[in-house]
Amino acid sequence: MTDALRIDGVTKSYGDTPAVCDLDLSMPQGEILALIGPSGCGKSTLLRLIAGLERPDSGAVTVGGRVVAGPSWVPPEQRRVGLVFQEHALFPHLRVGDNIRFGLADRPRAEQDARVREVLDLVHLSHVADRYPHELSGGEQQRVALARALAPRPAVVLMDEPFSSLDESLRARVRADTVDVLRATGTTAVLVTHDQTEALAVGDRVGVMREGVIEQLGTPVEVFERPVSRFVASFMGDADFLPASLVEEGLACELGLVTVRRDTAQAEIVLRPHEVSLKLPGPGVHGAPAVVTHVEYHGAFVLHTVRLASGRTVRSWQPHSVRYPVGTEVLVSIVLGIIPSVLVGERTLGASPATSPPTPAAAG
Amino acid sequence: MPRTARVLTAGLVATATVLPLAGCGVLGIGGSTADLQIYSARHYDLEGAFKDFQDETGISVEFISGNDAELLQRIKAEGTDGEADVYMTVDAGNLWNAGKEGVLRPLDSTTLTEAVPADLRDSGNQWYGLAMRARTTMYNPDAVKPTDFDATNTYAGLTDPKWKDRLCMRDSTSAYTQSLVASLIDLDGRDQALATVKGWVANGVDIKSNDVELLKAIDAGQCDVGITNHYYLARELEKKADLKVKPFWASQSGAGTHVNISGAGVVRSSDNPAQAQQLIEWLATKGQSAFVDGNHEYPVNESVKPEPVIAGFGEFTRMPLSAEAYGSQNAEAVKVLSEAGYK
Amino acid sequence: MSTWPSTRSSTRARFVGTGRPWWSATVVVIALVVSVPVLSVLAAAVASVGSPAWPGDLGEMLLTTVLLLAGVGVGTALLGVGLAWLVTAYDFPGRRAFSWLLVLPLAMPAYVLGFLFLSTFGAAGGPARASRDVFGGSAFVELLAGRLGAPVVLSLTLYPYVFLLSRAAFRGQGQATWDAARMLGATPWRAFRQVLLPLARPALAGGLAVVMMETLTDFATVQYFGVRTVSVGVYLTWKGSFDFASAAQLSVLVLVFAVMVLAGERILRGGARYDSRGGGQRPPAAPHVLTGASRWWAFAAAASVLAAGFLLPVVQLLWWAVSATLADSSSLSTGRFATNLTNSAVMAALAAVACVGLALLVTHGVRVTGGRLARGAAQLTTFGYAVPGAVIGIGVLVSFAAVDGWLEALGVPGGTGLVVTGSVLGILASYVVRFLAPAYQAVDASFATISASVTNSAFSLGASPMRVLRRVHLPLSRSGIAVALVLVAVDAVKELPLVLLLRPFGFTTLSVWVYELANENFWEQAALPALLIVALAIVPVWFLVRQVRLAEPHQQVTS
């Protein structure tokens, strides 16, 4: 089976600043890839390169088995790549139906009508076909934009922060709907986001970009639980770092023994708040003594920040029923069964220096 | 993608080609079909004279008016493609310059040599003066007596302190001012001319941007004395007989009153030089009155009488005209004017 | 936030953009063709560095030019912004009518208002006589006929550019921000200075740039009032010294001024963007209802500007026209009126369509290629607006003559022949050279409100550049296109030096006719054709007003 999208050694610089460096990527049919990274990491440039809005300095882009950039050049309008923008970019002078019809110009009229109905049904908006974009809510506009992009059956759909212009309350709902539609149509999609929750929730795979390269590419579980570097660890969710040193049994940090590995003398361990347990001192309770310094109520969970004897702080999620006042003395330990990642310098011990190999798509 | 852009470019080219044709259709223009084409920098109503010529000879004439310098550039740029047969302009300096630029062809015409006084035509027979205007002092009789003027050099006499804050003159962009100063440079030398202009400025000369405005200012008593072309006075008198302005013929005991000419020559690239010459000859002889009277100008042909209104201004002696001086000294005149602080 | 970098890219790509060579080429070809006449003038300027015959008081001319620009700038800014605010924020008798009537002075050529001014405030005019009779002469009235006349006349005829743009800027958001500022305790003056002026800044910058260009290249009006700008210097040198090359050098100086004006516009415009992405629009707030004497002050302010810039001049022209016709009614029957009117109207229409068509191609080309090459080329097209008209005319003549020469050298019999001056093509070409700039600016401003993602979406949906132009860019920039058509048409109706120089035999427009008569001070006879110019120019101005009114209820059309 040919990949829906292949990127081979693509490089793109703006002046002396490299935006994308010798990047490789391939996506099987039907996969949803979430690209995440701080601003300026090159994720939007990568999207522009795939769409044909930029030319790569070197390397090749292949869409649906056809080379569109590299040895040959195919302009954006002939690439069969759909685009969905943050601001939706609907044509304000065209009705919803005509917006969608825009990409179907070369088909017979009857087929156009059928397809417009079909994609509007898909996004549950059949009733707005005759309205103008400004008459729709933000969420509806976003769904029309998706329907419009899907209508010509593109090989790949590219979405540039498609949900970030929506209200928080609306966002999760629209996001879920969007994923449903993408799955239902078996669409291959690249979604650029700066929201790690979104990346983890939507992507079959998540690519974490930094300075023009994909630092880690893997399933959401992999990038969250087995980050390959300090950057990925801290970017994909909250993380605290504690120094660890070699003891007899293995590596230990202030909270106790971490692993039996003995292959490094100096390291840091990565602790996510859900991996840190807090208990009130009492008989049979073990852990490192600490004092609660800060409490944040998040609804279902309560985030506690505690200061260890060394002066370092770590954070811990507690269920909403547990709420220690500031100043409470607690005992801190690592949640049972968790094996934290170990950092040597900037990289995780045991992780290959390159990205993890692509895994087959989970969806179909 | 290239296809569409190519179609577009083709469309543009097609439009560019069709437009002039369409334009011609809409606007009813083709090339000129008349026998003679004239580029004229005279803005007065020339139609009467040309119509008379056409009726008399059967030669049809068409003209466009414009600014002298631009028309000259146009003749030069059009080169041999040009339609112009005759270049007609105001100011001897312009005629001299046209001759110098080589756009005119010398004529061999005894009619013209006899009709036009020697100083009013080109020594190389490239152009001929056809109408003459005098630029002289005008005064408000309520405020000034003719004897107040210096009869020898009236223009320079206006530097006398007795004229302080009583003078009105034209601006330095005017060709009239420039050629007057050019003639003063030729006559009195640059230093004296500069002193004269400086004297005017020292007398607080009030600068007007046109001659009619200037005459109205004298009439209204805003200034007592000014220098204008004679025909503007004639024209204003026709509108308002009791205008309180009288002409004083300048420098009658000296070099005479400053005059300038309108004239014409046959364009070198003319495809009809014989009839073009015929037109100029006619304008200098039989057509003199038709050509000059409408604008109250003086005929150059001494055997033709001026029309009654200006005949009423009386006879005067004119300063001999040196087209070469007017032309070659014009740039110097502009410099003198700005050096003296004359606006 | 994720904004795609669209202006930075690697050297080659930055230069040519995303590689639509045909579109880059289209833009470059248009730019080159349009700038050839300007370049040929530059060439003439460079060719003779030998002995320039510049006027001796060039320094003073430069100073005069700066002062005049400053005067007209302040005048048009005060009138334009002030009146725009007045009709937007306050309700007073006649407000609705004034909001479009105040655009009418745009139809009055400055050279016509100039000679009307002179005849009114000049020595023989009523005010001068009255002031002499009463006070023994008034310095102010004399000043109006002199130095002060030029900035006053130019301000009165040019302020509508600023007025139109400022009004659009104030509508929708002016009232709300003003109220907010006042609620925060700002005095009206402080609110105006710190809130409204910044709000009007881009509009002010755009409008002032047009005003400055017009002022810079004006010859007729400033010459009436004896104000010696560099443009006057150009003519003085050209005619006084018979030296076109030196005149061309001075034209370059005018061009330098223009470049400074454009740079000033960039600075004045600051970081403000027209691109109103996403932002929801507020409905225009209800104007503040004035009561008591203040409503009549407001009325008087608007009415006096309208009277000075339009009504009184029209009445004076009518008066002259009637008396001239009574004196000699034969002039009415000559049929010249119909011909000259048609000529003016058809030329204006052709020029408007040609300029806007090209402006659209250029703007679209820049958008779809995104390269510096296209953008730089587009900038070139604006220079024609910054050189005095007659100089451009010579440039067109010389360039056509050169093309003609090449064609003949290539063996085309007769070359282009008299295609330049033998037809209206020459005039049309020179109009395009001169008026592409305002057309481009209007269309470009309109394109700026179409966000890049709309364009990119259209491409991703498989639309060719032509289809994107037709289906997306064209409908979305309609308002800008309408404004561009109107601006060019009005300018073309009033235009004088180009048509005077390039017209074929038997071709006279209204403006040429007025010029021929006014040049010899036959003002009464000139009144009727001058009125026709005003009447003809009102037609596009009327369309503009309608367009603006239609656009106002739902002003912008971004996503």
Image (cartoon, rainbow, N blue to C red):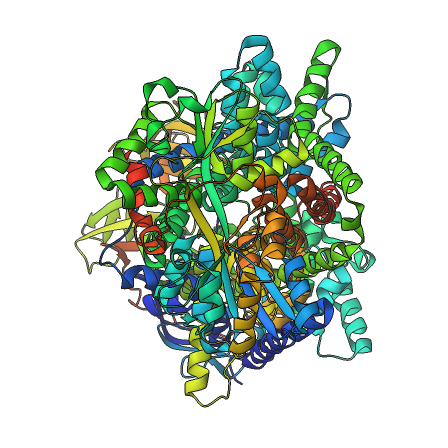
- Between residue C146 and residue B275, name the one nearer to us: B275
Asked if residue C19 can be seen in this view, the reply is no
Residue shown at the point (65%, 53%) measured from the top left: C489
Q: Residue at x 76, y 72 (%)?
A: A115
Find residue C176 and report its image quarter.
top right
Residue A62 percent location from the top left of the image: 47, 79
Seen in the picture, residue C211 relative to A80 is either above or below; the reply is: above
Location of residue A215 by image quarter: bottom left
Asked whether, in this view, residue C79 is left or right of residue A180, the answer is left
Q: Is residue B236 above or below residue C353?
A: above
Image quarter in which the C terminus of chain B is found: top left
**x, y (%) of residue B11?**
62, 77
Most extreme residue toward the front, as rendered? B303
Snapshot quadrant of residue A71? bottom left
Q: Nearer the viewer, residue C288 or C228?
A: C228
Question: What residue is at 46 percent from the left and 52 percent from the top?
Answer: B261
Image position, residue B254 (x, y; %): 33, 37
Quadrant into which the N terminus of chain B falls = bottom right
Residue A101, x across and y down, in percent: 73, 68
> A35 and C91: which one is in front?
C91
